[in-house]
Amino acid sequence: MTSRNPVQKFKERNLFSRLKKKDNDAFIEAYDLYVDDIHRFVFFKIGNKEEANDLTSIIFLKTWEYIKNNSLTDSRTLRALLYKVARTSIIDYYRQNQSVSSLDDENHPIDVIDDSQSVIEQISVNSDLEIIRKKLPELKMEYREVIIMRFINDLELEEIAEITGKTKGNVRVLLFRALKALRESIEAK
Amino acid sequence: MKLNKNNSMTDRELIKKLNNLQNVKPDENWKTSHREILLSQVRNTSGDFHVSGWSSFWMVTRNVFASVPQFAYASLAIVLFLTAGVFFGDRLPVGPDNSLYIARVISERAKLSTMSDGAEKSRLTVQYASEHAQDIASTLSAATNNSDKEEVAKLNDTFKNEIAKVKENLPVVKPSANTDDQVVTIADSDVATTGLTVYTNDSEKKAADVAASTTAPVVTKDAKTILDEAEKLFNAKDYSGALDKLKEADQVIKQ
């Protein structure tokens, strides 16, 4: 797992400080920095590409509205703030659409975009993706969520704890159980 | 998905596979078009943004400190401590009974090892050794009967080594000669009262300089004699007497 280096951390903190002062250019920079992560988070949670696009747009607009009207003292990092908004937006989305499609939706295949990958690597990624695509929805929602945040989007334990409102210890336990459940699910195929 | 011999996957392998899913990204066209929409909406709804130079500087500084891991601070602190120790450690007013004494000794050794001037190096060696001997005498004079005997014996040995070091370097150390600035012209009657030497012409001054240079070994010999006396007093456990003698020797060496 790759952790962010001090330069990245500094960049993110600086961006967050500028956003506290309602700097709109900083928000566009934040969009460039986090759009992939937030889109991925939404996509793996709801499993639909078009819906993920729409929800990601809503999440960024909601976040900007929040930044404009609040002093941002309740979030320690911009990432945490974005994920909090994303979580509530997804909950709203589920409430509004009771019969949502899942990751198993064959009509919405996942696009893997990485030009630097070789064909073999691409096949391997697609194969892994296929298994995750089938097995991830079988997990409990909270398991799925922590797996996406920690192992796919590389969030730190502190950030996950802040986003989910749990302690670091609870997150660690949750991650352990989630990983075990996913492994068992894959091995049982 | 790759499975091991037991047909089960380790957590590490699974995490690696999950990490690969970072390649799942939204469509570039969607990202660009959405960015444009977001930019126009954000620009329309924001007020004037202004950050002063000072507040910007403060913001950046604070974020730099918040972003650097604590071990980096710890490393920096250690480097600063060692650097300060090397440069200023020899000025630490600590005796052999203090935990910082070792820092002082290391600093002195570091300073001596960087010196190329032989005479200056000897002068400093004498100075440090003399100071160490004085510190040891001072520490032992304050020691009680309950003091650690092993520690006392160790200090005794160190004292002897330091005295030997001073004696060894004494012949190299030259007493400082009088400079022209120190020569004062005063009336004859003042000579007796002030004790200052008055030269009426250059030949007299040169003669005095020659005399001063011939007295140098005498000063060294005097210092040696005083050091011998100090050593004797130290062996007789008269630490206060030894300390006084050491101070006297120090004065003679510095003349």
Image (tube, helix red, strand yellow):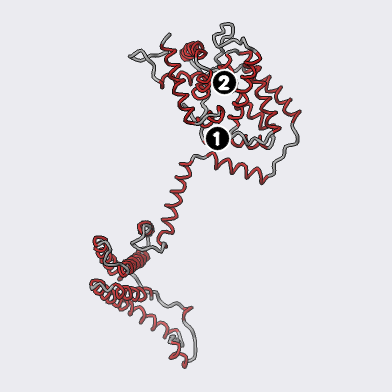
Residue B248: quadrant of the picture: bottom left
The answer for how far apart the CA atoms under marks 1 and 2 are is 20 Å
Q: Classify mark 1: residues with Cα within 10 Å, few (<14), some (14-19) or many (20+).
A: some
Q: Nearer the viewer, mark 1 or mark 2?
A: 2
Among the two numbered marks 1 and 2 on one chain, the one whose residue lies closer to the N terminus: 1
Q: Quadrant of residue B245?
A: bottom left
Locate residue A141, reporting x and y percent: 53, 18
State whether residue A67 is above or below residue B72: above
Label 1: chain letter: A
Name the amino acid, label 1: Lys
- Count the marks: how many? 2
SS of the residue at dot 1? Answer: helix
**Above or below B168: residue A105:** above
Could you tell me residue B96's position as x and y percent?
33, 62
Pointer 2 local density, CA inside 10 Å: few below 14, some 14–19, many at least 20: many
In this view, the residue in front, B148 or A44, is B148
Q: Nearer the viewer, residue B96 or B87?
A: B96
- The residue where tag 1 is placed is A9
Looking at this rendering, what residue extends furthest in the bottom direction?
B189
What's the chain of the residue with tag 2? Answer: A
Q: Name the residue located 70 percent from the left edge and 32 percent from the top edge.
A: A68
- Is the C-beta separation of discs 1 and 2 under 8 Å? no
Residue A71 in the image, given as x and y percentages of width and height: 67, 36
